[in-house]
Image (tube, rainbow, N blue to C red):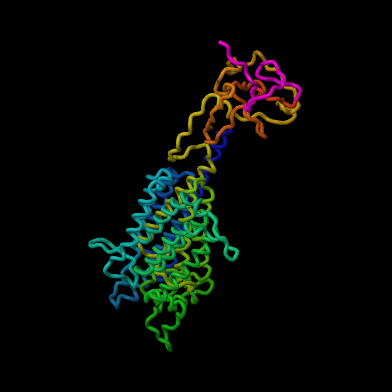
Amino acid sequence: MQSTARGEGRRLAVRHRNIELGLLALAVAVCLAGHIDADLALTGKMPPGLLVHGLSLGALAGVAHLVVRRFAPYADPLILPLGVFLTGFGLMLLDRLDFSYKAAHSAKGDYQKLPAAPSQLMWVFIAVAAALALIILVKHHRFFQRYVYLVMAGALILLTAPIFSPTDSFGAKRWIKLPGLPSFEPDEFVKVAITIFFAGYLMASRDALALAGRKVWGLTLPRGRHAGPVLAIWAVSLLVLIFERDLGTSLIFFGVFIVMLYVATERTSWVVLGLLMAVGGAAVVGTLEPHVHGRVEAWLHPLNYYPPVSDQAISEQPAEALFSLGTGHLTGTGLGSGRPWLIGFAGRSDFIFTTIGEELGLAGVTAILLVYVLLIQRGLRTAIGLTDPFGKLLATGLSAALALQVFVVVGGVSGLVPLTGKALPFLAAGGSSLLANWLMVALLIKLSDSSGRTALDPAQPSPEPLPVPAAPQASAPMAAASAEPAPIGPGSGNPGTGDPVPAADPGAPTELRPFTDPGAATELHPAVGQQPPYEHSPTGTQQRPYGHTPAEPQQPPYGHTPAEPQQPPYGHTPTGPQQPSYGYPPVAEQPTHGYGQPPQPPFNG
C-alpha cells in the first residue's frame, strides 16, 4: 500500500514537471510575440536579433527546468514559469523603451539615450544562474535556520552601508558605489535576509509573543515586555527612513515583520499596533525630512507642478504617470504606439508600469497584476503545505515581501501612496533587483519542493533532516507496555466488558514469559512498601506507577502475548465473572498497600 502511494506521488510529480515545461514554452512564446509586435509598430520590420533572443531565452528556461526536475522534483509547477514570463516581458519592454529613448535623447546627448536591455539581459543570466546554484547546493530550506543571526548581521551591514555614501542618487541614499565596480542596491538583498532572520526568530519566540495582555477598547493588546522586538524593528525602519530617505525599504522592512508576526502569533493586536506605529512614524518623518515631505506633497497635489501654482519643489512625474495611464483606456494604444519616454529618467524603473498602462490599457495592467497575484498565491499555498514552522514563516515572509514591493511601486505610480523609488520586480531595469527577486524564486521553489514532497511522497525522508535530540532508552518492559491498547467493547474478548476471555492456545508461539515469584521485587513488581520509580517513555511523558487504576484502560505490562487476548495486570479485579491473573488461580479480594498488590508474607530465609 505504501509503495503504491509513493508510486502515485512520483507520477504526479512527473506530471507537474511536464506542466511546468509546457508553461515555460508558453511564457517564452508570449514574450517573443510581444517583441515582434513592438518592433513592427516602431520600425515596420521584424526585430533583427529575434532568433538569437528567442533561443537564448528558451535555452535559459530549459536549463532551469532541467535543474528543477532533477533537484526539486516536487516543486510547484507555476513558480518558475511565472518568473520566466515576468523576466522575458520586462526584457521586451526595455527593448521597446530603448528605441524611444534613443530617438528622443540623441540630440540632447545625455545618459538616457544609452540602451538598458543588453545589460539587463546579462543580469538575467547572472540572476538565473545564481538561483539555480541555490537550488542545487542547498539540500533543504532548513539549512538557513542554522545561520539566522549571521544572515541578520550581514543584512544590517548592507542596510546601513548607504548611509556612509558621500553622494546620493535622486534624493535617496540607496546605492553603494565602489571604484571599478558597478553600483548596486543593497536593500534588495536585505529584504531576503531579514525574511530569513524573522522566520528563525519568530519560530523561537512565538509562544512569548502570543501571550495576551490587557484589553483596551475590545482589543487584546500584547504584553508590554514582549513589545521590545517590535519597537526595535520600528526604530530601525525609522532610521532607514531618516538617514537614507528610503521610504520604500522602510515600509517593506516593517511590513514584512508585522505580517510574519501575525502569522506566528495569530494576534490581530500586533497588526493594529504595527499599523499605528507605521503611520505615526511616517507622518513625523514626512513632516520633518525635506525629501520625504516633497514626495508626500507631490502625492497629495500632483498637478501643482503646472501653472498656475508652478510648484517646482515637487516632481512632475506623478502627474505625467496619471496622464500616461489615462491615455491607455481599456485596451491601450498598442505596443510601440505610446509615448512613455515623456516620463523621463524613471521610465525604465518604477515608472515602467505606466508603459503597460498606456500601451496595453487596463486589460494589460490587470493581466500583469494577476501574474503577480498568482506568484504570491503560490508562495502562500506553499506555506500552507509545509509542516515545519520555519518553512511556513519563510514562505509567508517571501510572499509578503514581493506583495509589499509590488504594492508600493504600483500604488506610487497610480497615485494610491507616495512614490518610493523602488524597482518593479522582474520588469524594471536593475541588476540588484533582478538578482534578489530570482533568489526569492529559488527559495520558493525549494520550499514548494518540501511541501510537495510531504503531500505527494510522505514516506520519503527529508533530504536534510535536522538533528533530533535522542529520546531516553526505554527498557524492555516499558517497550512492551507502549504497544497499542487492545480494543474495548462487546465482542472484543477484553476483560471488563462482560465478554468471556477465550483460553490461550498452548501451541501458539509466545514471547518470553518468565515465571517469577510474585512477591519478589522486580521492575514492574516492587517489593511491598517500596515506591516504584517513574519511567520515562520515548515521548517524554511520565508513566503511572504499576497497579494504578486510571479512568482509561491501562497498557498491558511485560509478558503480553500477541497471539492471545490481553490480560489485566496483577491484582486487577474485572467486572466480569472471570478473574484471570497471568495464569495464577483467582484469589479473593484483599486489602492493598496502594499499588494494587496484596500484602506479602515476610521472607523467611
**Which image quadrant is residue 412 in?**
bottom left
Q: Position of residue 585 (x, y in %)?
A: 69, 15
Q: Position of residue 249 (x, y in %)?
A: 40, 64
Q: Is residue 514 left or right of residue 472?
A: right
Between residues 79 and 549, which one lies in front from this camera angle? 549
Q: Position of residue 393 (x, y in %)?
A: 48, 52
* Image quadrant where one finds the N terminus: top right
- Asked whether residue 589 is drawn in magenta, I would say yes
Between residues 595 and 339, which one lies in front from this camera angle? 595
Q: Main secondary structure of the magenta part?
A: loop
Q: Residue furthest bottom?
A: 308
Residue 125 visible to the viewer:
no
Residue 532 visible to the viewer:
yes
Q: Residue furthest top?
A: 605
Number of numbered markers: 0
Query: Which residue range is magenta in the image?
Result: 576-605
Give above or below for 563 relative to 44.
above
- Residue displayed at 29% across by 78% down: 108
- Residue displayed at 51% across by 28% down: 474
Give above or below for 600 relative to 432.
above
- Asked whether residue 179 is drawn in magenta, I would say no
Q: Is residue 29 left or right of residue 111?
A: right
Q: Position of residue 55 (x, y in %)?
A: 39, 54
Between residues 395 and 521, which one lies in front from this camera angle? 521
* Image quadrant where one finds the C terminus: top right
Q: Is residue 544 left or right of residue 402?
A: right
Between residues 364 and 528, which one lies in front from this camera angle? 528
Give above or below for 454 relative to 600.
below
